[in-house]
Image (cartoon, rainbow, N blue to C red):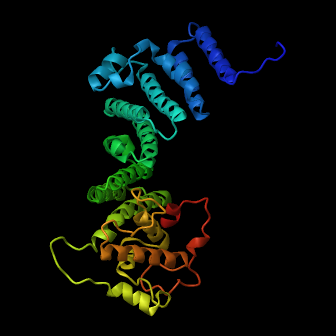
């Protein structure tokens, strides 16, 4: 190299791209077509794992899809156009699964390229592009769904939709992703191979994401309704499992407990407030004696459950970990600033503010070692595990289902 040569910042990336380009050109005429396609997409999946999204997009997924033309995903909005462009010979060809895999890979890489250039999606064009990618992933699932052998593509599609949607939700775009999360949830229910208990944790994760979207959009009624619907689906699957001659494993029982806790938490998030809210148009005296008694007698001298909120926790959840998880979810509100110095309830209803105070009282008692079943002595027994001593490596939901 000449003196004074400085290595270009993008030289390593371009070198890898050139090597791949040369390899594909060299081996494409020498290898069987399907074997060549399989190795190309396998390389693309590997590059995605190591976060080389540009390389995977242009040298793997994009290269495979070049033979279908250069139609942009925003131009393909219906099933008929989708099939005409990517499956002109039908869906029963020996390369159909490769095409679906490449389409999903290109979609997720396109999303990552958008995030790399605009991590917080501050530009409207970035948000619109993510919406187009979600719509295209939904279209892929719509085409694949009737074909059971391709159920793995349905599952992967829901994972991609969830990942993109959670990022958009964290940035305040819940209303834009609600329909896609709903579609992902219904797709998991509509695919018979994905109805097994092994996929139940993922289904409940999607259910919870839909409920959270509704709460973010201030549609708590629909969030509770969808959570109750999720409980019905879980109950139906449990009944089918009970009809089986094979004994239930410990992992299956834990999966059902975890799913039930997740849905119950989303129900509690609304019920704990709505059960105390004053009906509109009716006059009734303010009832605050319960909370005042707790404050006057000294909260540390009363046995659990002490308030209406704690009694609801005991009725709906078994164990202090599940109860604490419900408290955290009930107090979480994406529409409020964390350090905002204002009353806890936007409508300033006295009853709702009492609920917030009772939630904090209950959380404090659980952290101190109390909570759990009825008639629990203050701060629990000597054998009761203190929640504050839990290790950070395990999520709270794992303790809630023990």
**Vertical side of 93 occupied by 261: above or below:** below
Compared with 397, 144 (above or below) is above
Query: Residue 73 is drawn in which quadrant?
Result: top left
Residue 188 visible at all: no
Q: Where does the N terminus fall, quadrant-wise?
A: top right
- List the single residue furthest toward the bottom: 297
Furthest residue toward left: 281
Side of 2 relative to 266 (left or right): right
Residue 79 picture location, percent across and down? 28, 26
Using the image as rendered, state which of residue 326 and residue 126 is in the foreground: 126
Q: Is residue 146 visible?
A: yes
Residue 162: image location, x then y, percent: 43, 43
Q: Residue furthest top?
A: 29
235 left or right, relative to 363? left
Residue occupying the point 42% across, 26% down: 100
Give x and y (percent) for residue 327.
43, 69
Residue shown at 82% from the left, 17% from the top: 4
Quarter-of-image position of residue 158: top left
Question: Percent x, y for residue 334?
Answer: 41, 56
> Who's the residue at 53% across and 83% down the image?
379
| Residue drawn at the location 28% of the way across and 72% of the way down | 275
Relative to 196, is 33 on the left or the right? right
């Amino acid at each position: 190299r000449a003196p004074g040569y400085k290595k270009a910042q993008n030289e390593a990336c371009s070198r890898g791209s050139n090597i791949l380009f040369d390899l594909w050109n060299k081996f494409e005429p020498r290898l069987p077509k399907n074997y060549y396609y399989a190795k190309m997409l396998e390389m693309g999946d590997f590059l995605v794992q190591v976060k080389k999204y540009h390389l995977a997009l242009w040298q793997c997924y994009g290269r495979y899809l070049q033979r279908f033309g250069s139609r942009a995903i925003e131009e393909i909005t219906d099933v008929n156009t989708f099939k005409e462009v990517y499956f002109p010979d039908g869906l029963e060809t020996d390369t159909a699964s490769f095409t679906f895999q490449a389409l999903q890979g290109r979609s997720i890489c396109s999303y990552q390229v958008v995030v790399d250039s605009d991590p917080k999606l501050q530009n409207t064009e970035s948000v619109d592009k993510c919406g187009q990618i979600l719509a295209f992933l939904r279209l892929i699932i719509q085409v694949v769904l009737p074909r059971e052998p391709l159920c793995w593509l349905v599952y992967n599609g829901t994972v991609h939709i969830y990942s993109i949607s959670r990022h958009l939700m964290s940035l305040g775009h819940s209303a834009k992703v609600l329909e896609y999360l709903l579609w992902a949830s219904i797709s998991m229910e509509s695919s018979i191979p994905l109805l097994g208990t092994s996929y139940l944790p993922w289904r409940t994760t999607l259910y919870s994401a839909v409920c959270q979207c509704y709460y973010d959009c201030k549609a708590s009624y629909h969030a509770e309704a969808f959570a109750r619907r999720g409980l019905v689906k879980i109950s139906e699957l449990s009944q089918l499992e009970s009809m089986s001659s094979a004994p239930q494993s410990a992992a299956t029982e834990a999966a059902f407990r975890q799913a039930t806790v997740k849905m119950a938490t989303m129900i509690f998030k609304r019920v704990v407030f709505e059960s105390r809210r004053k009906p509109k148009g009716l006059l009734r005296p303010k009832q605050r004696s319960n909370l005042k008694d707790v404050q006057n007698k000294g909260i540390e001298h009363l046995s659990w459950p002490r308030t209406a909120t704690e009694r609801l926790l005991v009725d709906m959840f078994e164990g202090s970990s599940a109860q604490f998880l419900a408290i955290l979810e009930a107090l979480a509100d994406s529409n409020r600033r964390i350090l905002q110095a204002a009353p806890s309830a936007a409508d300033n209803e006295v009853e709702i503010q009492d609920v917030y105070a009772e939630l904090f009282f209950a959380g404090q008692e659980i952290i101190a070692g109390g909570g759990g079943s009825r008639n629990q002595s203050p701060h629990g027994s000597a054998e009761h595990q203190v929640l504050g001593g839990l290790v950070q490596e395990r999520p709270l939901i794992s303790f809630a289902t023990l």
